[in-house]
Image (cartoon, rainbow, N blue to C red):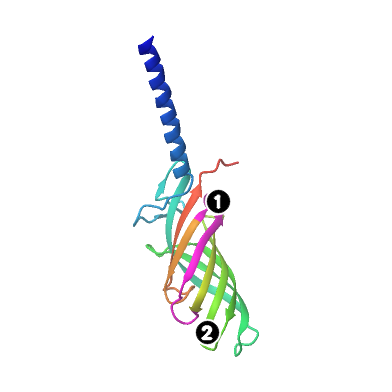
Amino acid sequence: MAPRGLCTLLCVAFLIGTLSGTSAQDVNHGKPREPPVGSLSKFNPNTMHYEPVNSDSRYTYYRIKINLNETFSDTFRPDPNEPHLMSAVISGDAFDNSTGIKVGTFDTSSISTVARDNKDMQYLATLAVELGPNGDDTIFIKAAFDRANFIAEPIDFDLAVVGGTGRYKGATGEAIHSGTRMTVPDNVYVAEVAVPRFKRF
């Protein structure tokens, strides 16, 4: 009986340890990880989709590097000579940074507080980058300047990925921007996106 009892005890201990380990893994993997350092999603011109850089049981990961080129803008500016609120809408084309291929379009709306004559400002914006063959794979980004000069390179530019549609449904993550202005050809956006692996309809 002793050996059998010992075997039963060891099996129970092993089972408890296995369940505890699985639970710990679930806790650790419940949140998305960052894509592998240095990896970029490649644009496939045949499918008009970006390829993931990695995936796990819960998320598919993308790191998308694009340029946004403004083709239209309109601004409501009450009095450019005084501190004021300014609202703007901007739209244009999105290009893959590596190949120069047009991959989609973008639209953004913003409201800014221009504080002084030198154009120092506080800025909040919502940006939608529409990708995919029909423009149905959209990444939504919220952007904020804590303080920035509208003419020179942005200062403290924070961008969060807050959602998406199609291939990017439920997307979360963040983005970075480099360049002199937000929507001219020399600007670059890199978005790190984690997409939950939903069961589709």
Q: Is residue 166 magenta?
A: yes
Residue found 47% across the figure and 40% down from its top: 26
Q: Is residue 122 visible?
A: yes
Badge 1 marks a residue whose secondary structure is loop
Going by the numbered disc 1, the residue's amino acid type is Gly
| Residue 20 image offset from top left, x and y in percent | 44, 34
Q: Total marks drawn?
A: 2
Going by the numbered disc 2, the residue's amino acid type is Lys
Quadrant of the snapshot with the C terminus? top right
Task: Estimate how packed mark 2 is, as few (under 14), some (14 to 19) or many (20 or more) residues with alpha carbons within 10 Å.
Answer: some
| Residue 121 image offset from top left, x and y in percent | 54, 79
55 displayed left or right of 161: left
Q: Is residue 91 above or below residue 3?
A: below
- Find disc 2 in the rendering and name its residue: 119
Residue found 46% across the figure and 62% down from its top: 175
- Find disc 1 in the rendering and name its residue: 170
Q: Nearer the viewer, residue 90 or 116?
A: 116
| Residue 23 image offset from top left, x and y in percent | 47, 36
The disc at residue 137 is: none
